[in-house]
Amino acid sequence: MVELQDYNSLEKPNWCPGCGDFAILGGVKKALVELGVESKDAVLVSGVGCFAKLPYWVKAYGFVGLHGRSLPVAQGVKLANSKLKVLAFGGDGDGYGEGGNHFIHACRRGVDVTYIVHNNSVFGLTTGQYSPTAEQGRRSKASPAGSLEKPVNPLALALASGATFVARVFAGDLVGMVEVMKKAIEHKGFALVDVLQPCVTYGFGMDWYKERVCALDHDSKDLKGAMEKAMDNSKLWCGVFYEEGD
Amino acid sequence: MMKSFVIRVGGEAGKGIASAADILAGVFLRLGYNVFSSKDYASQIKGGHNYHTLRISGGDVGADVSKVDVLLAFDESSLKRHLAVVKENGLIITDVEIDFGEIRKVRVKEIEEKLSQKNLDNALFLGIAVKSLGIEFTILKEVLENYFSRKLELKEILIKAAEESYNNCEEWMNLEKLDGSNKEFLNGNEALVKGALDAGLGFHVQYPMTPVSGMLHLLAKEAVDNSELIVVQPEDEIAAINIALGASFAGKRAMTATSGGGFALMVESLGLAGMAEIPLVVVEGQRPGPATGLPTKTEQGDLKFVLNSGGGDFPLVVLAPGDVDECYVEIRRAFYLAEKYFLPVVVLVDKQITESSKTVDFSKESFDFDGVVKIVEDVDLNEEGLFKRYAVESRTIPGVENGMYTCAGDEHDEVGCITEDKEIRIRMMDRRMGKLRKVSEELVREEIFGDNEGLLVVGWGSTKGAIKEAVSRLQGEGCKIGFLQIKNMAPFLSLHIEEIIGKFSKVVLIENNYSGQLGDVIREKTGVSINDRLLKYDGSNFTVDEIYDYLRGKING
């Protein structure tokens, strides 16, 4: 019987109090425990950013590599030993910026890796510059007059690139997040879980998200419908956008 | 018996030049000869000028020379380009009109019409070449049958065409059959692949790049029926090295291969391999840079880049084999050192090695992989049950009970947890960098070829064959001359090299690059400056004659 205790590390995370990363860390452990994955068979791979320290604070096999490179490492691990449950972690800068190429190709390669992206639309660890998911006009140290760039749409990008499981969750909804993470981990193939999370120091707070997130109510087997929802910016839709199946 | 004999096959890309050269090599191997085959081609799939040069001998042969005995010119351009290098008493085989001493005309159109077939050029040229050299047709037939074994219909047509051509030609000489058996004939890419597989390669990731794409092709083919081998062609070189690192972390013996441009993309990850102590073998096949450079030509221009790749100090081993035979040994040594010391090892070769073929005689040096990975014991666990992987000479792989740790690119403690503690930082740096001393104790010392006094020639990598032959020739003429081939680039055996250089009254450096990079490395590591340098950076390799002439001048001068 796998218990939460098995995954608990004695080391305490050093994220800012109130950071969404705490919720994601708790959610990941809960999902693995509820799926009965033994900690020796779980491999947590990350890159560089605040989020990327997550494997240090989980008692399992971890791999904390380079900025933007968690996906290639994770695919290498899974291809080398298919019995392992491999979770890759990315950030919006790490995963959608620095590692953007790997993201596209992981979607189409389809190696059975669960990709959890901590998306707070800001570079936290380098003190608050606008990230690839920041809205046009975002003011930051690197964009004092407002960013001119449009944000990347990771869900639409994943769908267009052939990902067979695409979801977005909100770190403020632990129950919903864990449910989707479990589905993603169980999905045979590449699975994206984009996690909206507050950055209490440089980005939007919990309340900002709570006002905007909305549960998705649509047929997750419908690829066209999923693409339509992914392109719909009227709300921050959360749930499983697409899951390939019969 | 003649010392060596040279045939060049030149023509437009896509006309069967490469297969003609391969088939000729097969014929000579069957006759018991040693063969060295190099190729020169344009970065163009159809229409560019390509040529292959085969040098055959009863003795060792591993380098190009300036003159050829027989030229097979498939088109006018080949004739124009190579006419000047055909020996006065040589032979030209062509379908182009030309005024030359000995010519064999290939009646391509006539025979193609007679047989109602097209694209028979290579078979027709081969028929004449083989007859001219006084070789029995059955030998060519056997080689053709073997070469085209999967293309039944084509095989029959080509044999028929070759025979037609063979029967309508006179002998020009009689190439004797030697006692030697049909030896193994490989290029550098093939030897690297063979060595890697023999060393237990389980995972190869490679983005295509000349001059090492051949490795990807060979291994992809191997993986079809080899369930122990996984081959991935990823989106870019950064993905390549990181996928390989993930696979190695998970327990597969992993490799990637690239050239200078791709290697530039990999270097941050090379540092990760050093920091996180992950075994990894990287083959770097040099071609002339910078940037895209001359993609299909050869150069030794990446030595200093490779030696200094990555940020920060980390243990990096760099081995530079000098020919196809050494590729087989050094790639196995690379896996052995990578596995034993948990570090990245670069095998530095170049186009001249990876894409030239020769008859090989592999060294019997063996590497014992047993006991490289030790078993985790209870004493190796910390108070919360994590494996103190960065305190012991051992590692675990995911899935192993009680073996959990974090493989970390941040500075880390014994179980891989991130830390900024100064004492731990120093301990970990010392642990990682200390590996180089242990590796240097295991490396095979460089030896002098030739004399231990007089003029010393220093070189590395693919210049080996040409330098050795030039040195032998000069020794035969009574000169005191020796050759030092440096193979261990990192760790560099500084004292040993300094001692060898000190024995000689005069030293010259020969390198296939612009700046004499090995010379700079020697000065950095030993304080010795070598000011006499023969450097070549036009995209082609040295011939024996070029080196001989240079050395002759130095001795006379």
Image (cartoon, rainbow, N blue to C red):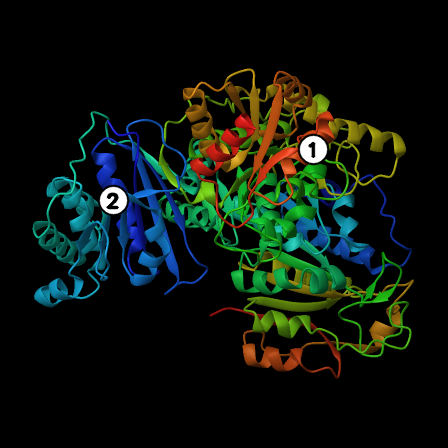
Q: Is residue B232 visible?
A: yes
| Residue A223 image point, x, y percent | 55, 77
Asked if residue B385 lies left or right of residue B282, the reply is right
Q: Is residue B444 visible?
A: no
Q: Is residue B39 above or below residue B335?
A: below
Rendering quarter of residue B555: top right
**Dot 2: few (<14), some (14–19), or many (≥20) neighbours within 10 Å?**
many
Q: Residue at x 61, y 35 (%)?
A: B533
Between A110 and B341, the one lying in front of the other is B341
Type of amino acid at the residue the image marks with label 1:
Pro
Type of amino acid at the residue the image marks with label 2:
Leu
Q: Label 1's element?
A: loop
Which residue lies under the disc numbered 1?
B315
Between B291 and A48, the one lying in front of the other is B291
| Residue B467 image point, x, y percent | 48, 31
Asked if residue B59 lies left or right of residue A116, the reply is left
Rendering quarter of residue B341: top right
Mark 2 chain: B
| Residue B329 image point, x, y percent | 47, 29
Which residue lies under the disc numbered 2?
B24
